[in-house]
Image (tube, rainbow, N blue to C red):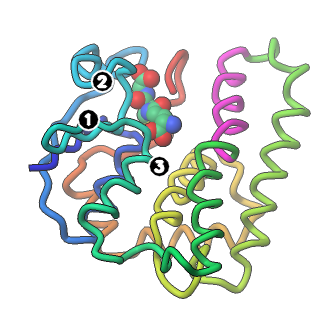
């Protein structure tokens, strides 16, 4: 059976949510962030050399990187659900959002997190980080204004990718000025499958990762 190697307070919450939306069978193998520095425990490196989460194992496959995992699961268990028809224009937009979440949107938020550890020493970096966060959040805010989903008229894997970004932004306190993003995030978090995934995954509080040398 498909196993999700799930780290508390992490991106692997996405994968649990996806599997709950699909009603696909899976098992969770739990890993707990270490203390006082909340990195992943070394056991995760036995599953995949990067030692990060999410990682899934399914038969002969071990797959890291959440976007790749979402696509693999949709290919194998989706039966056409949660992504647009591959021949449609929406599919082109879907691919763009899928890659955008980790490829562009997360970077300034991670820089914000790390800069926070440096205190005043990070002052020269702040304007660049803040303007890039505003650039990314404004882009998503405009895309979601008046819409329930990023692409088409229903949930897709791209929403699942982007929602983690917004949760990270929220935990950093930078989502206040973006009403469409807040509304979208609340609607996603109210979905029954999202809530089931939270119950099964256990602790999920991204604010608790805000200590030195974590990701
Ligand atoms: N781009 C990767 C990022 C994976 C990643 O950095 N995961 C974090 C959790 S959100 C992690 O495992 N951090 C623990 C560590 O680095 O020790 C993905 O989307 O899967």
Could you say which is closer to the camera, residue 75 or residue 122? 75
Q: Residues within 10 Å of mark 1 (few under 14, many from 20)?
A: some
The residues colored magenta run 105-118
Specify whether residue 58 is in view: yes
Q: Is residue 137 left or right of residue 130?
A: left
Residue ranking furthest to the front: 87
State whether label 2 is within 8 Å of ligand 1.
Answer: no
Circle 1/circle 2 CB separation < 8 Å: yes
Q: Is residue 145 left or right of residue 44?
A: right
Which quarter is ligand 1 in? top left
> Could you say where residue 73 lies in the image, as x and y percent from the top left?
30, 57
> Could you say where residue 144 lies in the image, as x and y percent from the top left?
69, 75
- Residue 91 image label: none
Question: Which residue in the structure is indicated by mark 1?
Answer: 62
Q: Residue at x 75, y 56 (%)?
A: 137
Question: Which residue in the structure is indicated by mark 3?
Answer: 67
Q: Residues within 10 Å of mark 3 (few under 14, many from 20)?
A: many
Of the image marks 1 and 2, the number of the one nearer the N terminus: 2
Image quadrant where residue 127 sits: top right
Q: Is residue 117 magenta?
A: yes
Question: Which residue in the structure is indicated by mark 2?
Answer: 48
Image quadrant where residue 52 sits: top left
> Could you say where residue 101 lies in the image, as x and y percent from the top left?
60, 51
Label 3: state its secondary structure.
helix
Q: Is residue 21 left or right of residue 124?
A: left
State whether label 3 is within 8 Å of ligand 1.
Answer: yes
Label 1: state its secondary structure.
strand
Marks 1 and 2 sit apart, C-alpha to C-alpha, by: 7 Å
Q: Residue at x 17, y 44 (%)?
A: 58
């Amino acid at each position: 059976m498909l196993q999700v190697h799930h780290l508390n307070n992490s991106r692997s919450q996405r994968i649990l949510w996806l599997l709950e939306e699909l009603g696909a069978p899976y098992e969770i193998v739990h890993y707990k962030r270490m203390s006082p520095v909340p990195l992943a425990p070394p056991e995760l490196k036995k599953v995949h050399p990067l030692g990060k989460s999410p990682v899934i194992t399914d038969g002969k496959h071990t797959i890291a990187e959440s976007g790749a995992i979402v696509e693999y699961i949709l290919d194998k268990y989706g039966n056409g659900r949660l992504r647009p028809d591959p021949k449609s224009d929406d599919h082109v937009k879907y691919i763009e959002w899928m890659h955008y979440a980790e490829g562009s949107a997360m970077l300034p938020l991670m820089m914000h997190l790390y800069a926070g550890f440096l205190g005043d020493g990070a002052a020269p970096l702040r304007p660049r980080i803040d303007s890039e966060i505003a650039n990314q959040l404004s882009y998503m805010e405009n895309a979601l204004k008046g819409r329930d989903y990023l692409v088409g008229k229903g949930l897709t894997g791209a929403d699942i990718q982007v929602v983690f970004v917004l949760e990270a932004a929220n935990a950093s306190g930078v989502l206040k000025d973006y009403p469409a993003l807040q509304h979208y995030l609340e609607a996603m978090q109210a979905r029954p499958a999202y809530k089931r995934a939270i119950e099964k995954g256990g602790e999920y509080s991204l604010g608790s990762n805000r200590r030195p040398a974590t990701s």
